[in-house]
Amino acid sequence: MDYSIETAPLEKLQCDCIVVGVYQDQQLSPSASLLNDTTQGLIGKVLQRGDIGGKNGETLLLNALMDSLTDRILLVGLGENKALSGKEYIKALTIAANSLKRPQIKFIVCCLAEIDVEGGDRQWKTRQIAEVFTDVAYQYTHTKSDKETESKLEKIGIAIPIAEQAQAQLGLNQGQAIAEGVSFAKWLADLPGNLCTPTFLAKQALDLGEKFADLSVSILDEADMETLGMGALLSVTRGSRQPAQLITLDYQGGEKNSKPIVLIGKGLTFDAGGISLKPGLGMDEMKYDMCGGAAVLATMQVAAQLALPLNIIGMIPASENLPDGNANKPGDIVTSLSGKTIEVLNTDAEGRLILCDTLTYAERYHPDVVIDLATLTGACLVALGRIPSGLLGNDDELCHELLAASETANDSLWRLPLWEEYQELLKSNFADMANIGGKDAGTITAACFLSRFAENFRWAHLDIAGTAWRTGQTKGATGRPVPLLSQYLLNRASQLSI
């Protein structure tokens, strides 16, 4: 998608469609009022007829305009004539983008950056336009013979006053980088498990390393992991014919000796549950068990593309979890890289096994903070649904920073407790701990397990099991939490200039 900042008067812009906002009670946004004047009161007449009431989420496409350089005007309802919330603004953008999926509309000019939004300046509003329109236009075609997509949009101009051009351009640069990262994460996750293997993920990381000078990539293979003593991670891959990979991306954009931010993403490219086999219905969606890894790759791309003045380590333990004569069995005991032993009571609780060794391995980078993200527990979907991701951690400041970033990015989080009492549920008679804690508080006990390997640094865990992909008729990856992580990094970068 080609984006640009447009500062010319609306009446002089030649495009397929101009997008403007209208409020309830027949009130017009500034751009809608201007176009109303240049179209002989057409917009006012349409509102008087009641063809659109102005409620948030309504749209109306006006065709065949007389004496106008633009062919169409899309009216977008904004609700009451007052500042919109961030979610209301994004809802209006999403509805507008979906309304423009027409083969004859290739170049539009969007005037919605002028709308008042609570806490949203011109930079933020411009950024959201790029993120939302790119997200709506995304369509997976990689394994289809027909590569035609529903949206034919090629160019989006964003109308901005000249005085605010620099601020809007910064927002556009950020929005395009995040949007491209989200699309990258969605594409990786939507690929089938026979194509997106651990080796394939490693190749994507190496390609990023070739693209950006400040980004280096290293890969540990199974022999390397065996030498290090990563018994937990290796136990998961024993049932697979695909070799496991521990992918590390090292972005050096900050001061040489500044401690890095470490991002760890679960990269199970397919999870059948192992010997504790999952039910067949819906098992195809377990190709999405690598969404955490995809999000880390995408966020590293965003950071490098924006040349953020930070040091960031991205780590992706990548494997499959399949049943086999050599696979983990319930009751097996494995020794982690930390030396702690784990009784595997359920082989389908494998994500924490590959993450725990990666958390221990991350200590060698002397991190400032470590954030892991994983499609870890179905219990998180039961507890929170598909709106927020779950957040748990051992550091209040880090968790508060992530919550603040989630609000700005409209990529919601909800913090769950990590109380010591929950640790009791992981007791084992035969090892230092069990890999599950029973039927209660599954999301929390999974985080309790991980916390035992994060005692030496500030750490937060994001459970994205309910938010990383959609199911049903709109099945597909969401690209979350790339916007959240990108905003967190932008916030950290901005703190350096204070």
Image (cartoon, rainbow, N blue to C red):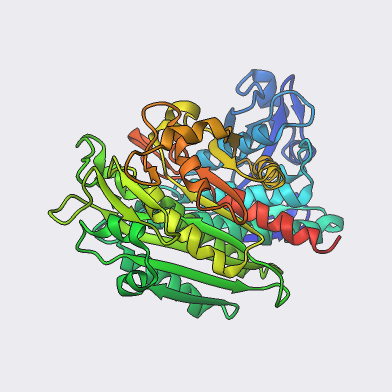
Pinpoint residue 73: horizontal percent, then vertical percent.
Answer: 63, 40
- Count the marks: how many? 0
Q: Nearer the viewer, residue 469 or 432?
A: 432
9 sits to left or right of 139: right
Q: Is residue 252 above or below residue 83?
A: below
- Mark yes or no: residue 28 visible: yes
Q: Nearer the viewer, residue 460 or 477?
A: 460
Q: Is residue 492 above or below residue 112?
A: below
Pinpoint residue 189: horizontal percent, then vertical percent.
Answer: 38, 53
Q: Is residue 74 above or below residue 351?
A: above
> Residue drawn at (69%, 43%), measured in percent from left and top?
408
Q: Which of the 4 image quadrants contains residue 407? A: top right
Q: Which of the 4 image quadrants contains residue 143? A: bottom left
Q: Nearer the viewer, residue 142 or 430?
A: 430
> Residue drawn at (55%, 58%), measured in percent from left and top?
263
- Mark yes or no: residue 14 visible: no
> Residue drawn at (86%, 60%), measured in percent from left and top?
498
Pinpoint residue 172: horizontal percent, then vertical percent.
Answer: 68, 58
Q: Residue furthest left?
A: 325
Q: Residue furthest front?
A: 429
Q: Nearer the viewer, residue 71 or 215?
A: 215
284 sits to left or right of 165: left
Pinpoint residue 252: horizontal percent, then vertical percent.
Answer: 63, 74
